[in-house]
Image: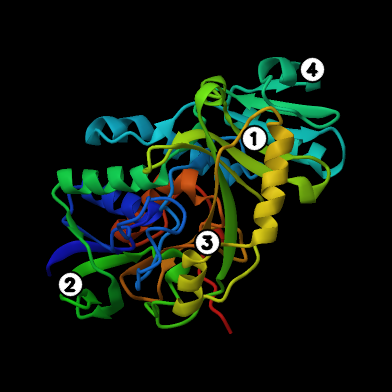
Amino acid sequence: MDYDYIVVGRGLTGSAAARHLATAGLQVALIGPEEPRGGRGLAQGHRTHHSGVFASHYDEGRITRILDPNPYWARFAQRSIARYRPLEDITGISFYGEVGHLAVGQDEGASRDYLSALQQVAADLAVEVEILDQRALQARFPYFQFYENAVGLWQRQQAGYLSPRQHVKAQARAVELLGGCLINQEALSVGPVADGVQVETAADSYTARGAIVATGGFTHASNLLPQRLQLTVRAHTVLLAEVDGADLERLWSMPSLISKPYDAEAHFYLLPPIRYPDGHWYIKIGCSEMPPIADDLESLQKWFKGPGESAIADRLKARLSQILPDVQFPAYWVDTCVTTHTPTGYPYIDRLGESPIVTLLGGNGYAGKSADELGWIAANLLQQGQWTYDLEAAHFKLRYAT
């Protein structure tokens, strides 16, 4: 065997799984292409001429926080966030901005239920939060303009944002420091062989005792699995708004924000100013409008290279003007990515039949903040050969398409 274990998929969860395997003293290979190079490193400029697979971590901003209405996802996040600083220290790669997180809603209907669920999770996990009424919100965050009867939950510590691009780099660097191998190639097939698995790329073939497949939205497009799963790929359009000068200075301590008023169509999330590879600072805003997209290679490539949905981008621009009415934005960029969803709302972390192949698929739009813990679960399952995690295995079982 060339390695003890191979991880196919060099994104947030795959790179985390590889690091946890390497930390256990195992010989690990992490296989997957690097981000396409060239252009501004922003929006579509660096993607136009790329002919292979893409990944949604080609970005600098993801919200991270423990507050979540789902107690399992909150726990995944809490355990992941606890490992952020140690990983930065080990690798010298910074990816975490602890600016805090603000969840805002209204005291009625589903919005009230959302805030109540957050409060319950905070109590269960001993997370310190502050409850702010509309007057307190405006006093604490004067640059925001909130809607009528707004109520906020403010998590100051263990929350803010992370750079998914730098987080993946840190995980991969840790793999190397622990003696693992990075293979900058696309996997063409993953399958069982005598006493293990074999992974084929265009350039070579690699064998190991077992493997993890963490290939995100391109899983079916790459035909890596013997059977289709119940996975839905959804398309995201996000807006990046440039800030500079006095506005940048005023918003320097801005937290990440999730806004869920009683009107579901008005939901959005917002990230503070973050420096992108072109040297400029951008605020990122997105929403829950995520239409499904065909998961064949051509459709996914077209989406990643394309301009996104203009109607969604226009609505995001309007929401940005409402929440930050006094900020001047000299430039806007529209970006695209995808998320992969399962019927259970939890990832597929399960053995593929009787083979020594473990899946790590379906982040359901929440894996960014929780990737480290999800990688740990998959790595542990692969090593132990059985489920030993402290949450029920049934939530993570594979479901095949009929």
Q: Amino acid at mark 4?
A: Arg
Q: Which residue is label 2 attached to?
A: 207
Q: Residues within 10 Å of mark 1 (few under 14, many from 20)?
A: many
Pick the quarter of the image with the C terminus: bottom right
Q: Secondary structure at mark 3?
A: strand
Question: Is residue 162 visible in the rendered structure shown here?
Answer: yes
- Figure colour scheme: rainbow
Sequence-first disc among 3 and 1: 1
Q: Which residue is label 3 attached to?
A: 338
Q: Is residue 68 left or right of residue 338?
A: right
Residue 254 or residue 275, whichever sits in front: 275
Per the model, the C-alpha gap separating discs 1 and 4 is 25 Å
Residue 383 or residue 86, whichever sits in front: 86
Residue 192 or residue 231, whichever sits in front: 231
Q: Amino acid at mark 3?
A: Val
Q: Which residue is label 1 attached to?
A: 121
Sequence-first disc among 1 and 4: 1
| Residue positioned 58% across, 48% down in the render | 239
Circles 2 and 1 in contact, beta carbons < 8 Å = no
| Residue positioned 70% across, 59% down in the render | 311
Per the model, the C-alpha gap separating discs 3 and 1 is 28 Å
Q: Which residue is label 4 attached to?
A: 135
Question: Is residue 157 visible in the rendered structure shown here?
Answer: no
Q: Position of residue 1 (x, y in %)?
A: 12, 70
Q: Position of residue 252 (x, y in %)?
A: 51, 23
Circles 3 and 1 in contact, beta carbons < 8 Å = no
